[in-house]
Image (cartoon, rainbow, N blue to C red):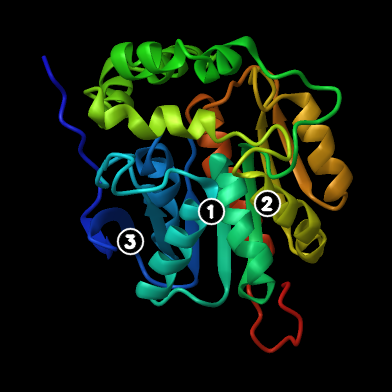
Amino acid sequence: MVTEARSPFTPHFFDRDGLKMHTVDEGQGDPVVCVHGNPTWSYAFRHLIEDLRRDHRVLAPDHIGCGLSDKPGDDRYTYTAASRVADLEALLEDRGVRDDVTLIVHDWGGMIGLAWAVRHPERVRRIVLLNTGAFRLPSTKRLPFALWLTRSPLGALLVRGGNAFARGTARIATKRAPLAAEVRAQYLAPYDSWANRIATLRFVQDIPLSPGDRAWPILEEVEAGLTTLADRPIWIGWGDRDIVFDHHFLAEWERRFPEAEVHRFADAGHFVFEDARDEIVAGVRAFLEAHPIRRTSGSPAS
């Protein structure tokens, strides 16, 4: 049986140079922007959205090629980090989201969301990091074999032909318990054909590992700009059993953001928002309440 990808929320679409870019836009109040990674989509943030929309305006876009957004070929879209950052910038401008932003980022969403943030640090008030990175591979960390294989010539056949990356991630990204069948089906549903799996492959191919890679300039820009965000309230929710964004990445975040509030979940994996769903929702809620946005202050941080 083929499962149709369905958002739990009312869909909204933004025209991005002739391509439809889907976003969730729920609730009213100070904006919370959730930026997903690969191979997920805005569905990953559904529990946070459900809670936070009570008193915030929560936006969660699907990157081009992901979720309910269009999935064009390479002839209509350039699948690079630079394009992703430009898309996010255009979407937020279109939706009128310019100030008092709280960012929640996961996986590739860290690079994309924080690239936007370092260009507009005055707009960012609070940051939530969930198993992500926004700097070069730590010197103590090796690229996992699964990512190396995906970047190899065999990768296109495995990822686009067999949906190996999305299927594999859905199976190993949770550690406390397997994803329920209907949840796993929704994670996989947008990536149901060779054509619709293009972004899944291109994201992995775009991982910046050396100065010759196309995403390297964005990486350098974000790395250099992270210091401008270090005084913001930052909450880190970390699944310790993530095979990619593991303790090597967490140590780098702690070095760069020594005042961050860190919560480690020893038995959680890459999909920390699934494994530790209740703890993540409650923790983010408590964090936002502990750091209200005060517009009377001259500082961008609360």
Q: Amino acid at mark 3?
A: Asp
Q: Nearer the viewer, residue 7 or 190?
A: 190
**In x, y percent, where is residue 222?**
71, 54
Determine the secondary structure under disc 1: helix
- In the rendering, which numbered label is found on residue 291? none
Location of residue 160 with respect to 32 vertically, above or below: above
**Residue topped by disc 3:** 25
Q: How many numbered marks does the figure carry?
A: 3
Determine the secondary structure under disc 2: helix
Which residue is at a point 72% across and 36% down the rendered structure image?
263
**In x, y percent, where is residue 131?**
63, 34
Instruction: Name the quadrant containing residue 118.
Output: bottom right
Q: Amino acid at mark 1?
A: Ala
Q: Earlier in the sequence, mark 2 or mark 3?
A: 3
Q: Is residue 292 visible?
A: no
Q: Nearer the viewer, residue 282 or 235?
A: 235
Q: Are marks 2 and 1 in contact (CB under 8 Å)?
A: yes
**In x, y percent, where is residue 53?**
39, 59
Which residue is at a point 56% across and 29% down the rendered structure image?
272
Q: Are marks 2 and 3 in contact (CB under 8 Å)?
A: no
How far apart marks 2 and 1 lie (CA) works out to: 9 Å
Can you tell which of label 2 and label 3 is closer to the viewer? 2
Residue 163 lies left or right of residue 70; in this view the side is right
Q: Earlier in the sequence, mark 1 or mark 3?
A: 3
**Residue topped by disc 1:** 82
Q: Nearer the viewer, residue 194 or 38?
A: 194
How far apart marks 2 and 3 lie (CA) works out to: 31 Å
Q: Amino acid at mark 2?
A: Pro
Instruction: Classify 10 Å Cα crowding around label 1: few (below 14), some (14-19), many (20 and above).
Output: some
**Residue topped by disc 2:** 217
